[in-house]
Image: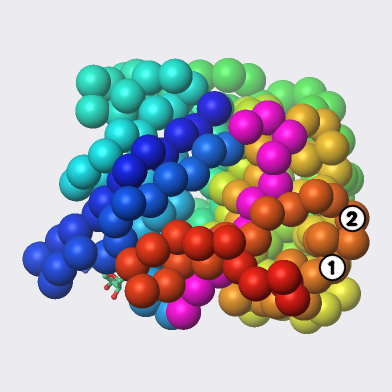
Amino acid sequence: MIELENVAYSYGGGELFSDLDLSLQPGSFHFLTGPSGAGKTTLLKLCYGELVATAGDVRLFGDDVRGMDRDKVALARRRIGVVHQDCRFLDHLPVAENIALPLTVSGRSSEGSDIDDLMAWVGLTRQADQLPPELSGGERQRAALARAVIMSPEVIIADEPTGNIDWEMSQRLLALLVELNRMGKAVLIATHDLTLIRAAKAQVQARVLRLKDRRLVAAGADL
Ligand SMILES: Nc1ncnc2c1ncn2[C@@H]1O[C@H](COP(=O)(O)OP(=O)(O)OP(=O)(O)O)[C@@H](O)[C@H]1O
């Protein structure tokens, strides 16, 4: 689905990482860890076509990103659900409308029970008409996940999804991600949250990768 081969990323400040390989296949579950500033968010952006690698190959659903025009990248992006670190809601729109936004933007109807089912799935039925600033941190993250999956993506990429939420809320979020994974979706999560990784490993076969000193390596067996 998403393949990175021999990938490097550099910017004005120098090389962030190089010689990086990663393959996200149906049903795979990956965690990405590493120190702050190591390049985790940048790596995720390469995986969903928001950034282009400075060397190496990135293939989205079989196509090399470099040969894809904007429209083709946009089509590939619809197959990838992204939960951003900062959630990025439109604060003047109710939660349900924020969640439906990918549908409305792509010209599909947001009417019907799909939204209601999704709101119920993430446990936000009661919050449907609230505005995003009125939600708790955990509710925001679950709303962000609902928005990420509304287009039925094949891959879910989440950047620090449990960054500001308590243990119970992060367990609820993890349960949703595990459920999506069991449906065959590939899941990639960047996180500093080691308890989240340990909890996930008790439920799914997850690979834990660590970005450190410009290389992507398997994390130690303690994780
Ligand atoms: N195009 C760019 N221009 C300037 N700096 C950049 C660019 N791309 C990445 N960086 C820098 O590279 C570093 C890696 O950023 P990134 O957000 O990917 O790290 P991270 O591992 O996700 O960090 P955190 O865990 O703190 O979220 C940062 O210092 C960032 O400022």
Q: Which mark is residue 220?
A: none
Tell me the kind of residue under disc 2.
Answer: Gln
| Residue sitting at x 54%, y 27% | 1
Side (left or right) of 193 relative to 63 = right
Q: Which residue is mark 2?
A: 203
116 or 186: which is nearer to us?
186
Please tell me whether residue 207 is drawn above or below residue 150 in the rendered image. below
Position of the C terminus by quadrant: bottom right
* Magenta highlight range: 25-35
For disc 2, the neighbor class at 10 Å (few under 14, some 14 to 19, many from 20) is few
Residue drawn at (82%, 78%), measured in percent from left and top?
167
**Which secondary structure, mark 2?**
loop
**Residue type highlighted by circle 1:** Ala
Image marks 2 and 1: residues in contact by CB distance under 8 Å: yes
- Colouring rule applied to residues: rainbow
Location of residue 86 in the rendering, given as x and y in whole percent from the top left corner:
50, 66
The x, y position of residue 14, in whole percent, is 15, 68
Describe the element under mark 1 as helix, strand or loop: helix
Q: Is residue 114 left or right of residue 43?
A: right
Tell me: residue 188, above or below residue 12.
Answer: above
Which residue occupies the foreground of this view, 64 or 153? 64
The residue beneath circle 1 is 199
Q: Is residue 123 left or right of residue 59?
A: right
> Foreground residue, 221 or 140?
221
Identify which residue, 177 or 132, lies in the foreground: 177
